[in-house]
Image (cartoon, grey):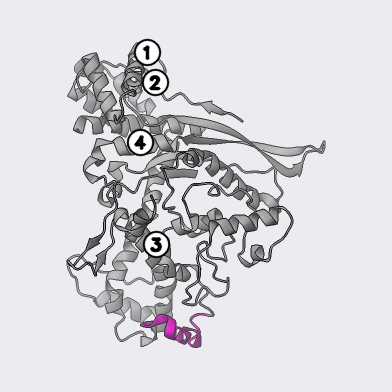
Amino acid sequence: MPATNFPHFATHGPTLSRLMNIIRQCQKSEGKTEFERYQKYKEDMGEDKWAPFCDEEEWGLAEWLVKSLGQTQTDEFLKLLITQNQMQTSFHNNQSFLKKVDELLHGGAWSCKKISVQGNRTDEKGEPLHEDVELWMRNPIECIKDLIGNPLFKDQMVYTPARAYTDSAGLHRVIDNMWTADWWCNKSAYPVYLSIGNIAKEKWRQMSAQATVLIGYLPSGKLDCFTPDEHSLASYRLFHHCMSLLLQLLVAAVYLILAAYVADFPEQCLVACCKENHCPKCVVAADERGDPLELPMWDPAVIKGILEKQKTGHHPAEFEEFGLCTIYAPFWANLPHSNIFLAFTPNLLHQLHKGIFKDHLVKWCLDIVGEEEMDARFKVMPDYPGLRHFKKGISMVKQWTGTEHKEMQHIFVGLLAGAVPSALVIFHANKDILQQLDIREHFNIPKLHQLSHYVQSILLFGATDSFNSKLPERLHIDFAKEAYHASNKCNYEEQMALWLQCQEAVFLHGSYLLH
């Protein structure tokens, strides 16, 4: 079905009309960012930088209202007698306040595309059941333009690749930001986020910088129109269909390339169209993931060919061998110059901190040393600046945060000195000792296998701290949870998009004022 245009707040008032006319005129001049066009509009209209608010104080109040209060609370605050008599603002209720916010510069507009999903279940008349879902999305190209044009990133933006070395002979290379890695040199309510590799990771990782933008909400329908045995596959196909719609403009814009895809392991398998007992990056067999093997990476063209043969009834042996699913139209199939399997980045939070370390290494060591001995060693560790002292031990803690995992890692090796057999030092060479001690039955562990891809990913995309899933999980709070709580919980997707656009408008205007 055709997309339904979503009004991006400002669709009324003479001020907006003048603004759009000015912007259209400015767009004729090449090389102008949205901020520069907005600044020229201000100059042409004879307005000061605080407009549409009266002065700096009123702007400060507006910024606080948007960031701190909901719409009902804003209305109540503005209607207080002390507010009206003492502040005398140019807006007197929430409606007039939002009209002011409407006039601010904001990011890419939202649109809604209706999708009708036909299931394999039928009603009492024998007609197939179907479910209508909504895909809320923004133009990713416009979002990228907003990031490039934001003056906050002007001094942290890089447009050409670079190689850094610790020595003048160029023998010892340093890989940190994305532009220092090989990829740049080799290439001319389900929130989806986007950022660009041009921004320095020091700025990109700052939550307050908003260098990662929300470009869509994928539908999360119940899909009751499918039988239980088909439900999961139907949701996988819906995911790929919606992602195709969301990223279809990238197919035409060949100068924009999907480089890195940050996701946890289940989502990587979903994107790779494979089962979770297989690796979403390479052709390792399902029962060999515990071995230190160097195997070829999956090839997008090969995988597309296998899926096409399966679709046409040829049933290639590789389909079962690679553990593929019957997703015949993966969203990445037509993305230019992209290799989705190489794009999957290391996930420090789930693979290392919560995965290998917490779920496996700590458990193995506890089984070897014993909880009492382990707790005793944590308790007697002396205090030291910068290191956490686990004065009660660790055995009684039921739920750990990623930060606590990292704090434990800082002292773990020293803590176990003399307690754990040296077989753990050279793990793959001597890991059978853990089976002999009945600690593990096997080492066919997906997260253990993923470590074998870390070096390749670092060489391609830079240091792993640039792609930790901790940031997207934190963004879920701002872009999903808080946005949902700001709605009336009925038809909430549209209200969430409006709320986010309001927040973004205030943030962008703040960026404009700072520069």
Disc 1 crowd rating (10 Å Cα; few below 14, some 14-19, many 20+) is few
Query: What amino acid is at disc 3?
Result: Ser
Q: Which residues are magenta?
A: 425-440
Location of residue 338 in the rendering, given as x and y in whole percent from the top left corner? 47, 51
Secondary structure category for the residue under label 2: loop
- Give the residue type that dot 1 points to: Gly
Q: CA distance from mark 1 to mark 3?
A: 51 Å
Question: Residue sitting at 28 percent across and 36 percent down?
Answer: 150
Q: Answer yes or no: do the residues labelled 2 and 1 have beta carbons within 8 Å?
A: yes
Residue ID for mark 1: 13
Instruction: Please give the name of the residue rendered at 21% of the width and 29% of the height, measured from the top-left corner.
Output: 513
- The residue type indicated by label 2 comes to Ala
Kindly report which numbered mark, 2 or 4, lies closer to the viewer in this rendering: 4
Q: Nearer the viewer, mark 4 or mark 1?
A: 4
Tell me the residue at 32%/54% (across/down): 178
Quadrant location of the C terminus in the rendered image: top left
In the rendered image, residue 124 lying in the magenta stretch gets the answer no
In three-dimensional space, the C-alpha distance between marks 3 and 4, rounded to whole angstroms, equals: 27 Å
Badge 3 local density, few (<14 within 10 Å), some, or many (20+)? many
Q: Which residue is mark 2?
A: 10
Choose the circle earlier in sequence order: 2 or 3: 2
Q: Residue beneath label 3, please?
A: 457
Q: Is residue 426 magenta?
A: yes
Q: Any mark on residue 395, and which?
A: none
Instruction: First in sequence, mark 2 or 4: give its number.
Output: 2
Q: Circle 3 sits in a helix, a strand or a loop, which is it?
A: helix
Q: Earlier in the sequence, mark 4 or mark 1?
A: 1
| Nearest-to-viewer mark from 1 and 3 | 3
What's the residue type where badge 4 is placed?
Answer: Lys
